[in-house]
Amino acid sequence: MQRNMDLGFFSTDISFENSAAIVTGSSRGIGRAIAIELARQGADVLINYNQNKDAAEEVQSEIEALGRKGVIIQTDISNIDAHEQLLQTAHKAFGKVNILINNAGITRIADILEESPDQFDLLINTNLKAPHFLTQRVANYMVENEIRGCIIYTLSISDSMASDNRTAYCISKAGLEMSMRAYAGRLASHWIKVNGIAAGVIDTDLSRVRIPDYEEAAEKGYIFMVRPGTPEDVAHATIAAMRLYDTGVVLPASGGVMTPLLNLRSMSELNMNKS
Ligand SMILES: NC(=O)c1ccc[n+]([C@@H]2O[C@H](COP(=O)([O-])OP(=O)(O)OC[C@H]3O[C@@H](n4cnc5c(N)ncnc54)[C@H](OP(=O)(O)O)[C@@H]3O)[C@@H](O)[C@H]2O)c1
């Protein structure tokens, strides 16, 4: 390795100045927080949304207030034919793209005994096939242009924890984790870092309905962190994953949900230590 070589995100001193990011699904929730945090760190950001134009415009204003460029594009990411336009819009606006955040995702509730093939296809196409092939397109662009970039996937604790009423979601996220690892292996020799964040129960439109369950579990001591996660918690983990001395790994932002814990509070009443 040559001295003074630009190692991009493989460097020991990572800077986001002069960076340009695509953040899918950045009009609301976790993507919104990641887009704003990237701008705060010095990056220009392409904001992608599907339906909520007003929300995307609010994110754009926040990014511009931080002194960075924010460009909006409406694209349903499950339409793979639209990925080229997504990439070219960012490239034209910023001159390059060196960061991709695969964040857009949806969930649907359905009992595994009743879930329809159409519902399954919707989840797989949006949450798995779309980010897998968007990564392929952006990775080829980075390789062709010798850009030493970084690709982060918003993954989930549902990669490894089953929910029998959200099974297609869990399957899509489990598959996506493997997509992340495979690209990390393929792209390491091109100095492109690829990592994932396993988000827990985060207070967004997608998960708000689960917050009372989280709080009850935390109160009973089954979960370490006494509060649910915020989109900003995941944004901070995303920046950490970009700075990490590693590629092909999943960093948790899950509030201890994944920490094995048998906390049977009522056991203390037995007072086993009494002689
Ligand atoms: N919240 C959690 O507890 C949690 C936990 C683990 C993982 N995650 C993952 O984190 C990611 C973001 O979730 P969130 O909680 O922030 O959800 P959210 O609040 O519902 O926001 C979803 C974002 O994705 C966009 N989007 C949805 N479908 C899209 C499509 N087909 N094409 C383009 N954009 C689309 C939405 O755009 P519009 O505003 O236009 O609809 C919005 O910006 C998802 O991948 C989710 O699986 C979330």
Image (spheres, rainbow, N blue to C red):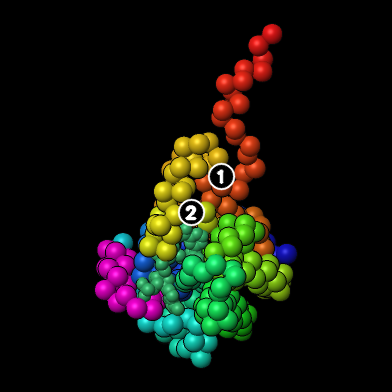
Q: Is residue 55 magenta?
A: yes
For the record, the magenta segment spans 41-65
Q: Is residue 54 magenta?
A: yes
Q: Nearer the viewer, residue 151 or 190?
A: 151
Q: Which residue is mark 1?
A: 256
Residue 182 position by quadrant: bottom right
The answer to whether any part of residue 178 appears in the image is yes
Left or right of residue 144: residue 44: left
Which quadrant does ligand 1 occupy?
bottom left
Percent position of residue 45, x then y: 40, 71
Q: Which residue is mark 2?
A: 201
Under mark 2, the amino acid is Val
Please state, as top left, top right, bottom left or bottom right, where the N terminus lies in the image.
bottom right
As measured in the structure, the alpha-carbon distance from the residue carrying label 1 to the one carrying label 2 is: 10 Å
Under mark 1, the amino acid is Gly
Q: Examine the rendered structure and indicate whether residue 42 appears above or below residue 253.
A: below
Q: Are marks 1 and 2 in contact (CB under 8 Å)?
A: no
Residue at 55% over, 40% down: 222
Left or right of residue 142: residue 71: left
The answer to whether any part of residue 37 appears in the image is no
Residue 192 position by quadrant: bottom right
**Dot 2 lies on which element?**
loop
Residue at 42% over, 63% down: 206
Residue at 31% over, 67% down: 59
